[in-house]
Image (cartoon, grey):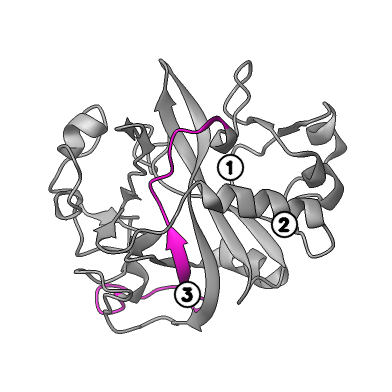
Amino acid sequence: MRLVFSRKGVDSSRQGGGCASPLAGGRCLSLPIPAPVGLPSRTRYGDLGLPQPVEALSGGRLRAQDPCHADPAFAGGLAALGQVGAAQTHLDTCGVGPGDVFLFFGLFAEGGGRAHRIFGWLRVRERCRLGRRPRPDPLIGLPWPHPHTEGDLAEWPANNTLYLGEGATGAPAHPALRLSHPDGPTTRWRIPAWLADTGLSCHGAPRRWARPGELDAVPRGQEFVADISASPAARDWLDATLELIPPASAGATR
């Protein structure tokens, strides 16, 4: 079994929106990134049913009329994640597929600062190879097409892939779901002991593990994979983490 720490949502980079996602009502509200250059989207921030105008939630960095890359997507206890390019090649190399779990984390504004937080998850039931020109498909009951299915708007990389399964978003602002150490930069993580034993892809340098119970996470990258097949402690930790983010019974959210 593989566990993927998957970085998603807006971040401080220009292409990532130049902002952090908010904590709204004590829960993580992950804002999707703007639609990437060359990969247009039908979905705009104003379509997402956000609890406040996106201009307010993003500190004016994003506008309601801006197209966005609403991925991962969640609805009625299900989730859909698309991936392409080098990140998808990495997932393939690591053997990620049915039965594996994505833990989605992102950058959130918190207490006058910013922190990496886990905000959602996806347990993979099915992996679909969409290819370059898939047909628009709302998937999982969404009222809009998933961006990785919009092959009529632009040509996707050949390894365009979709992961489907049970999932949830909107995690509470629980201390156990905060990755960033309170005394360090956002990429200095507090980690469970088992992660130092299993290791994490893209984090092979020993200097990243120099402090017990901590990890200096790489500042860029999307998918970090740990093989937890032989670690009961890791599976217990994952079960406890997912219990904090129960699936919604109905309705589409971002």
User: Distance of mark 1 from mark 2, alpha carbons?
Assistant: 26 Å
**159 in the magenta segment:** yes
Q: Position of residue 128 (x, y in %)?
A: 49, 82
Answer yes or no: is residue 201 visible. no
Instruction: Give the residue at mark 1.
Output: 220
Question: Marks 2 and 1: in contact by CB < 8 Å?
Answer: no
Instruction: Count residues near mark 2 (Cα–Cα under 10 Å), then give few for <14, some for 14-19, many for 20+.
Output: some
Instruction: Give the residue at mark 2.
Output: 235
Secondary structure of the residue carrying numbered label 2? helix
Q: Position of residue 84 (x, y in %)?
A: 50, 67
Question: Marks 1 and 3: in contact by CB < 8 Å?
Answer: no
Q: Is residue 175 above or below residue 103?
A: above
User: Distance of mark 3 from mark 1, alpha carbons?
Assistant: 21 Å
Which residue sits at x=67%, y=37%? 217
Question: Marks 3 and 2: in contact by CB < 8 Å?
Answer: no
Which is more N-terminal, label 1 or label 3? 3
* The one of 189 and 172 positioned closer to us in this rendering: 172
| Magenta residues, start to end | 150-175
User: Distance of mark 2 from mark 3, alpha carbons?
Assistant: 29 Å
Q: Amino acid at mark 3?
A: Asn
Which is more N-terminal, label 2 or label 1? 1
Q: Amino acid at mark 1?
A: Arg
Which residue sits at x=38%, y=65%? 77
Instruction: Count residues near mark 1 (Cα–Cα under 10 Å), then give few for <14, some for 14-19, many for 20+.
Output: few
State the image quarter where residue 43 is shown. Answer: bottom left
Instruction: Give the residue at mark 3.
Output: 160
Which is more N-terminal, label 3 or label 2? 3
Q: Main secondary structure of the magenta part?
A: loop
